[in-house]
Amino acid sequence: DGGITQSPKYLFRKEGQNVTLSCEQNLNHDAMYWYRQDPGQGLRLIYYSQIVNDFQKGDIAEGYSVSREKKESFPLTVTSAQKNPTAFYLCASSIQAENYGYTFGSGTRLTVV
Amino acid sequence: GENVEQHPSTLSVQEGDSAVIKCTYSDSASNYFPWYKQELGKRPQLIIDIRSNVGEKKDQRIAVTLNKTAKHFSLHITETQPEDSAVYFCAAKVEGGSQGNLIFGKGTKLSVKP
């Protein structure tokens, strides 16, 4: 799966429920990212982590939380505070060096039911 | 912070014609500009990138140009084929802190008609 795996591919959330999206990479990349994709909105950064046990808020962090306990893993929790969570979520990783692009996972489509 | 504008939002061309997608960026410190192709329901994939020390880069039917003075860069696809149909995103690397983040444009949906 290109070295970065997201699961599940589809996820359904009930109102008021927290859900966690998984992102695992075996590329030995230091940096990992979560993006949200809505139609016509492009890719918006939710959270990013450049090193284990450290992460930073992106442009739309409200209603989301992350952890980075291992280099390989960067799970995203969509909390009940996120009022409009239906979207396509993409995880990405990159090496810790300037001027290199990201490798993306295959995404998780989250739908509120 | 950095802002990336991308135009057009949709582009339709006949097979064999050329397609051009343009992006502008706001932060003059940005020095890395990748382009991603995203087919329907799939992950974005890097197709070409350019760094600020060059003005143009080619890879078969794809080329990217960079004008640092005007702060814009463009993707050129020649001899388009139906399999080029996808959403294309430009991005710019923000310099700041210990590591900048890619800032993406909103995407261009390219349709190549047979």
Image: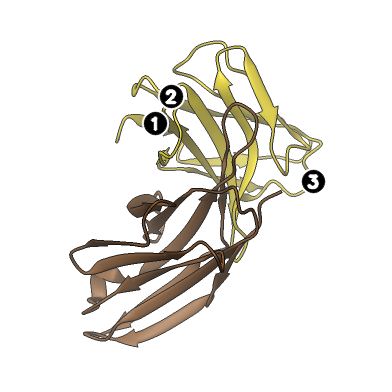
Between residue B9 and residue B72, name the one nearer to us.
B72
Q: Is residue B53 left or right of residue B84?
A: right
Residue A108 position (above or below residue A73): below
Q: Identify the residue position indicated by label 3 in the image.
A: A83
Q: Residue at x 58, y 25 (%)?
A: A49
Give the x, y percent position of residue B67.
47, 66
Q: Identify the residue position indicated by label 2 in the image.
A: A24
Do callouts 2 and 1 point to residues on the same chain?
yes
Asked which secondary structure carries label 2, the reply is: strand
Display colour for chain B: brown
Give the x, y percent position of residue B38.
39, 58
Q: Is residue B30 left or right of residue A1?
A: right
**Label 2 close to label 1 by CB (< 8 Å):** yes
**Label 2 close to label 3 by CB (< 8 Å):** no
Q: Amino acid at mark 1?
A: Thr
In the image, the chain rendered in yellow is A
**Chain of the residue on which disc 3 is drawn:** A
Between residue B92 and residue A14, name the one nearer to us.
B92
Q: Which mark is residue A5?
A: 1
**Chain of the residue on which disc 2 is drawn:** A
Q: Amino acid at mark 2?
A: Glu
Q: Nearer the viewer, mark 2 or mark 3?
A: 2
